[in-house]
Image: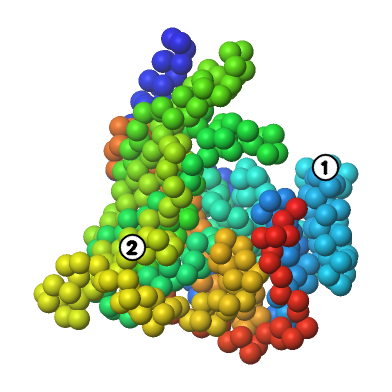
Amino acid sequence: MQDMTNRREFLKGAAWMGAAAMAAGCMSRTGGIGGIGSGEGAPMHGFRVPPMRKVRVGFIGVGGRGAPAVHRIAQIPGCEVAAISDINPERLDAVQTWLKEHGCPAAREWSRDGREDAWKGLCDWDGVDVVYSCTPRPQHCPINVYAMASGKHVMQEVPGVFTLDECWETVEAAEKFRRHCYMLENCCYGEYEMLAFNLIKKGLLGEIVQAEVCYTHEQRNLQYNPPDGVFWRIDRHMKHHGNYYPTHGLVPAGKSLDINRGDRLDYLVSMETKSASFEAFGRANFPVGDWRHDAKMVRGDVNTCLMRTVNGKVLQLVHNVCTPTPYDRGNKYLGTKGTILGIKDDTYRVGFEEKIGDNGAHHYFDAAKAAEVRETYKHPFWKAAGEMAAKVGGHGGMDFIMDLRWVYCLQNGLPMDTDVYDLATYSSVVELSERSVIAGSRPIEFPDYTRGGWKTAKPFTVDEIDMSKFDFSKSVVEDTDALKT
């Protein structure tokens, strides 16, 4: 116990020194490609590549996330599942069986021999254009950097990376090798997130001054009894503070507030509750002698971050997977003319003024008016592909729209909706929030991965998907949620 106390005191002191150094403008890092702010590569805002008529995708990790992604991508015209890599042969077999049953060519395999670095062969192979990574989080940065150095674009699961050093390494690799590194944040494509974005961009809510978002998803049994037998989730609670899964609420909010495109996150403060729910669950559900009975958590039940932008807007982000609370992503936006709150039908609320001061938003609109707003201002992506997305599925269809969109961007030579600077900025919350908690909730500055480019980068816009550019006549659209392996 004394050793643990000494360690905590050391960490508090180290974090305080780190916070003081950053407050003095001394944030730095070592390693990576060229060092912080090296400028070795060209900026990536607005980056695009020539149109790719055929997109050949290699999947690293074909388990719970990867296998449904294979099913979705195989159904998008102009896409080919060219390669798969997983150290579990049963997963490889399941994907190959599915491809065969659906008339798709067999994918080239890596990792069947169990070598954990066999995925590098997939990245090196010239039969792949895009690496789609659904791996454990420690592998994210190595895959990002290696794949881009091998000439591949990367689609990376969330969060894109974990540490500030990994953020800089990924940014610098994208700039040097001129490749997309896109974070697969599906919640950007949820119907209500995109509805809020559309309302905001049309000015119906006025200027947004605050966004309140969260990831509330009770996971006590999942973390104590992981289906794959790997305790990486609860390990984070036992060893670290902070928000280790920040992106589901934060990235959609960042898009609505034009983060890295006219504004940027300046600093955050992070605070968390005591740990109670996980430890009580362990004592109640596991016998004496089982390590889970007496497991002690470093991280508190609920972590809350407040982030302020350079232009004076505030984002509130809550992470809670510990208490028995219904699933929620928040999605509340407060503007000078109105507000919206919504993640699904039973929580969707909206109200706004026709003109400032008419008290039109003193109450939320009634159900009929709210339904009218939802239909009238449905985002063009959902108008174009919502019916098909509902059939294909993937978290209510947003996974399919996410994949359809990045494929559309590659096939038509468009910039990605979010870029490597966004991946780095939002992933930074993992380390910055822990630093702030350890330092007594002191403010911690965000690095500017754009190196000032945010000041001139074009704001986000409400784009469209022209479905006529996809030939779905030869595709069999199926429910991928029902096809999970």
State which quadrant residue 263 falls in: bottom left
Q: Position of residue 184 (x, y in %)?
A: 58, 61
Task: Label 2: state its secondary structure.
Answer: strand
Q: Residue at x 58, y 87 (%)?
A: 466
Classify residue 329 as left or right of residue 483: left
Going by the image, does 460 lie left or right of 137? left
Residue 325's image quarter?
Answer: top left
Residue 371 spot, x, y in % from top left:
37, 75
Instruction: Name the one closer to the observer, 260 or 214.
Output: 214
Query: Camera-side residue: 181 or 85?
Result: 85
Which residue sits at x=23%, y=73%?
352
Residue 279 locus on image (x, y percent): 47, 24
Instruction: Identify which residue, 391 or 354, lies in the foreground.
Output: 391
Q: Residue under circle 1?
A: 115
The amino acid sitting under disc 1 is Arg
Residue underneath mark 2: 341
Secondary structure beneath label 1:
loop
Outermost residue toward the left?
357
Q: Earlier in the sequence, mark 1 or mark 2?
A: 1
Residue 458 in view of the camera: no
> Residue at 43% of width from left, 52% of height from top?
328
